[in-house]
């Protein structure tokens, strides 16, 4: 009995990760991917395409690799379940993976609003990054 519990404890790694066959599996990420696929299958037909002739991200201008759903699939699902989508015209635009990942399921329903959110978020990240760079430079100068 204890041996089985020990194996189960070893199989369960850091919070939410399972070790299976030499690979760490983030169970939460797997579930998020499943939910995304389910939502895409159920609600995907509602989205019209905008700017599909462009190969660049509508937010940052880098090469686009994915579609950004506006509103996000999770937000549309919530709206439909609560009867809020009566006049909603969902659409999707070309986006790079980084902008799409940063936006995630933000309840922002316009491209302009999503651009403003990204600008604010990227500025916050830039400040944090600059602070880290400055700290590393101070440490390197101190060690010389």
Image (cartoon, rainbow, N blue to C red):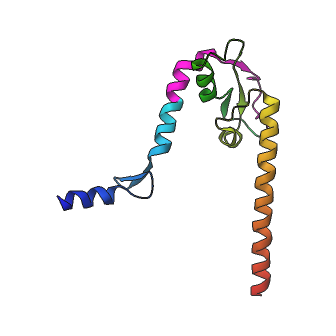
Residue situated furthest left in the rendering: 1
Kindly indicate the quadrant of the structure image that contains residue 93. top right
Q: Position of residue 11 (x, y in %)?
A: 33, 56
3 to 85, vertically: above or below: below
**In front here: 103 or 81?**
81
- Decide: is 89 above or below 140: above
Question: Furthest-front residue in view?
Answer: 82
Q: Residue at x 36, y 55 (%)?
A: 12
Q: Position of residue 25 (x, y in %)?
A: 43, 49
Image position of 6 (left or right of 123): left
Q: Is residue 108 magenta?
A: no
Residue 43 in the magenta stretch? The answer is: yes
Q: Residue 80: percent from the left, percent from the top?
A: 60, 18
Tell me the magenta residue range: 37-59
Quadrant (top left/top right/bottom left/bottom right) for the C terminus: bottom right
State whether residue 138 appears in this view: yes
Q: What residue is at 51 percent from the left and 28 percent from the top? A: 37
- Tell whether 99 sits left or right of 2: right
């Amino acid at each position: 009995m204890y041996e089985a519990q020990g194996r189960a404890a070893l199989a369960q790694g850091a919070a939410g990760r399972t070790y299976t066959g030499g690979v760490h599996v983030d169970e939460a990420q797997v579930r998020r991917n499943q939910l995304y696929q389910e939502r895409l299958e159920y609600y995907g037909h509602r989205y019209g395409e905008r700017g599909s002739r462009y190969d660049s991200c509508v937010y940052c201008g880098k090469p686009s690799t994915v579609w950004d759903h506006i509103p996000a699939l999770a937000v549309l699902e919530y709206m439909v379940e609560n009867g809020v989508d009566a006049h909603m015209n969902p659409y999707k635009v070309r986006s790079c993976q980084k902008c799409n990942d940063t936006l995630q399921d933000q309840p922002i329903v316009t491209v302009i609003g999503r651009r403003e959110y990204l600008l604010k978020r990227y500025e916050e990240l830039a400040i944090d990054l600059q602070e880290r760079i400055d700290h590393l430079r101070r440490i390197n100068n101190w060690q010389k």
